């Protein structure tokens, strides 16, 4: 199990971005992490993947553990070796490298057999990439680049895959396709922490969900319960009975969340 | 015609190949770390000294001495990166470039102390011998400079294009954070870049040391010619470094050959100025160099 325990993260020694965050991703599960811009979702992923120091951030309290072993002291390469894969927000593929090279760099820390198996897996999951394997990745469409980013993260055969906003900027048809791919990757045995603003997509495939706001987990529960929750429906799914919310309603919601957290 | 080929083109390509070697070293470090390495001249002259000691002092066969000198300088380059440059990661590239000026000073003082005031030779087998090339007599050392430089640059190119570490270095040069997230040890890539660059500088030092007069500590200043070369070729382009090195080498040699005859009024040593004239022209026409990446800023 991937567990985040009472985690505090500070940037530049002064900006407290995560406060007492606790979250669990059981082996083989899909867990959704919801939250608005600036809630701290990406910071949480950085804390798990050892990339905080790149942004002058540090864990000041709490821990991240993988099957009971501390993870938050490891640098990024060791985190990958421990079995954590990551797809960063905005895809961040290497546009000047070919599709094949992008995938191979994902298996940098793996042995030759794992790389070969990873390439087979990526090309069978994403046949469109197989047709374009020698093309520069910068020529791919947004959806294809997202597939490449996911394929690259799978090259090291991670037990846990962290996906940061995989639906961002994609057309609804492509979002549906990415959703199906996430389910398929999970079915093949990879646990997934799905960070999303698209709450309906995330909760429709997750077993459990967390809501992060201004650095705190303000709500968590089974995905079905969250989907039925009035606040989630109103503020994350836009399914309110009353279309025009007053400032008072929003303020009341925020106060309630403070009590909950 | 014979003179044009022998003293102009072949000699120019020979010295240009050496500039290209140095410039490729600059480019590799710049692409991997974003730092312009001003310590390259000191690494070059230390490479010439190491070759000299190993070939003429220790009596090693010349090719073995050259490879050993490259290995020694690679170790010096990697140690320099670890001690002086690694703490600068995340700081402004300008600050790191200033650190390389400090490294240049320290290594140059060491080189001066080791070499002293005497002129040394690297013990190369070419000397003043000449060879026939398409019926024209050319200096063997010029051919050696071209062949050795191109083989070395080709080997580096193959390494970057085909090997796993080369791929990791290219990825690191594009996006360090994403490379880290793929499991690439970015610090190791920085170290490797410095090692390769210093080894190329050592090789260039050996080639410059083959000139008839040998070399002394001050010969290190020749490496400063690599600066106009990288600017002409483009700071981030290995291909540009090679073409610009050859272009500047040939331009220099042709100027040395023909300027005293046809433009004597320009005065003496005009060939020394030629690389900088070409650099200024290119900066005006293409500020990012002949093969460099044009910076696009979204406004």
Image (tube, grey):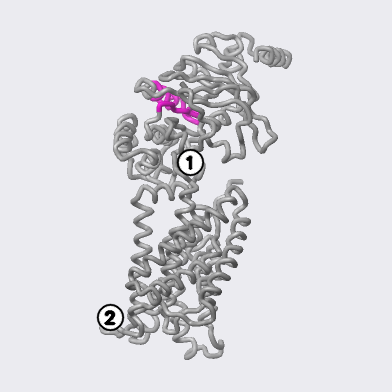
Query: Label 2 marks which chain's residue?
Result: B
Q: Quadrant of residue A7?
A: top right
Q: Residue at x 51, y 41 (%)?
A: B177
Measure the alpha-carbon separation of dots 1 and 2.
50 Å
The magenta region covers A159-183
Mark closer to the observer (1, 2): 1
Residue B180: mark in rendering? 1
User: Can the viewer see residue A17 in this picture?
Assistant: yes
Residue B147: mark in rendering? none
Q: Which residue is mark 2?
A: B133
Residue nearest the observer in this picture, A97 or B15: B15
Q: Quadrant of residue A94?
A: top left
Within 10 Å of the Cα at label 2, are there few (<14), some (14-19), or many (20+) other Cα atoms?
A: some
User: Can the viewer see residue A198 in this picture?
Assistant: no
Q: Quadrant of the C terminus of chain A?
A: top right
In the structure shown, which secondary structural element does the residue marked by tag 1 occupy? helix
Residue B224, compared with residue B158, is above or below; it is below
The total of numbered circles placed on residues is 2
């Amino acid at each position: 199990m991937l567990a985040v325990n009472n985690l505090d993260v500070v940037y530049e020694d002064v900006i407290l971005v995560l406060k007492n965050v606790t979250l669990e991703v059981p082996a083989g599960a899909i867990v959704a992490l919801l939250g608005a811009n600036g809630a701290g979702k990406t910071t949480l992923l950085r804390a798990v993947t050892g990339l905080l120091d790149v942004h002058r951030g540090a864990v000041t309290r709490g821990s991240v553990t993988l099957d009971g072993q501390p993870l938050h002291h490891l640098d990024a390469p060791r985190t990958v070796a421990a079995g954590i894969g990551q797809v960063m927000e905005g895809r961040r593929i290497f546009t000047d490298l070919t599709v094949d090279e992008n995938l191979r760099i994902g298996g940098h820390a793996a042995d030759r057999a794992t790389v070969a198996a990873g390439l087979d897996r990526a090309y069978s999951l994403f046949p469109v990439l197989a047709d374009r394997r020698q093309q520069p990745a910068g020529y791919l469409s947004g959806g294809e680049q997202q597939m490449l980013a996911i394929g690259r993260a799978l090259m090291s055969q991670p037990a846990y895959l962290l996906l940061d906003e995989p639906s961002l900027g994609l057309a609804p048809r492509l979002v549906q396709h990415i959703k199906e791919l996430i389910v398929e990757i999970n079915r093949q045995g990879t646990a997934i922490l799905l960070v999303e603003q698209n709450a309906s997509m995330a909760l429709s495939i997750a077993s459990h969900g967390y809501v992060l706001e201004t650095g705190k987990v303000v709500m968590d529960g089974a995905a079905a319960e969250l989907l039925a929750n009035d606040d989630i429906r109103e503020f994350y799914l836009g399914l309110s009975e009353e279309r025009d919310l007053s400032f008072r309603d929003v303020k009341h919601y925020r106060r309630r969340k403070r009590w909950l957290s | 015609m014979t003179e044009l080929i022998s003293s102009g083109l072949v000699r120019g390509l020979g010295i240009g190949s050496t500039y290209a070697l140095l410039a490729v070293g600059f480019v590799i470090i710049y692409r991997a770390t974003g730092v312009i390495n001003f310590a390259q001249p000191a690494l070059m002259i230390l490479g010439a000294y190491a070759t000299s000691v190993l070939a003429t002092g220790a009596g090693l066969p010349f090719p073995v001495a050259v490879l050993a000198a490259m290995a020694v300088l690679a170790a010096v380059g990697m140690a320099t990166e670890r001690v002086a440059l690694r703490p600068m990661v995340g700081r402004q590239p300008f600050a790191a470039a200033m650190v390389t000026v400090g490294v240049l000073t320290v290594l140059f003082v060491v080189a001066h102390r080791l070499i002293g005031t005497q002129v040394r030779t690297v013990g190369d087998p070419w000397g003043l011998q000449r060879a026939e090339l398409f019926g024209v007599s050319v200096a063997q050392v010029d051919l050696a400079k071209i062949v050795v430089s191109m083989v070395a640059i080709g080997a580096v190119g193959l390494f970057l294009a085909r090997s796993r570490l080369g791929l990791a270095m290219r990825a690191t040069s594009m996006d360090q954070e994403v490379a880290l997230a793929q499991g690439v040890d970015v610090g190791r890539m920085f170290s490797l870049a410095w090692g390769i660059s210093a080894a190329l500088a050592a090789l260039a030092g050996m080639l410059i040391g083959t000139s008839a007069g040998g070399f002394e500590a001050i010969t290190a200043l020749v490496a400063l010619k690599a600066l106009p070369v990288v600017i002409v070729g483009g700071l981030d382009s290995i291909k540009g470094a090679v073409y610009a090195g050859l272009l500047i080498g040939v331009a220099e040699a042709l100027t040395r050959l023909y300027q005293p005859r046809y433009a004597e009024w320009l005065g003496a040593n005009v060939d020394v100025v030629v690389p900088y004239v070409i650099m200024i022209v290119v900066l005006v026409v293409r500020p990012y160099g002949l093969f460099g990446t044009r910076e696009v800023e979204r406004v």
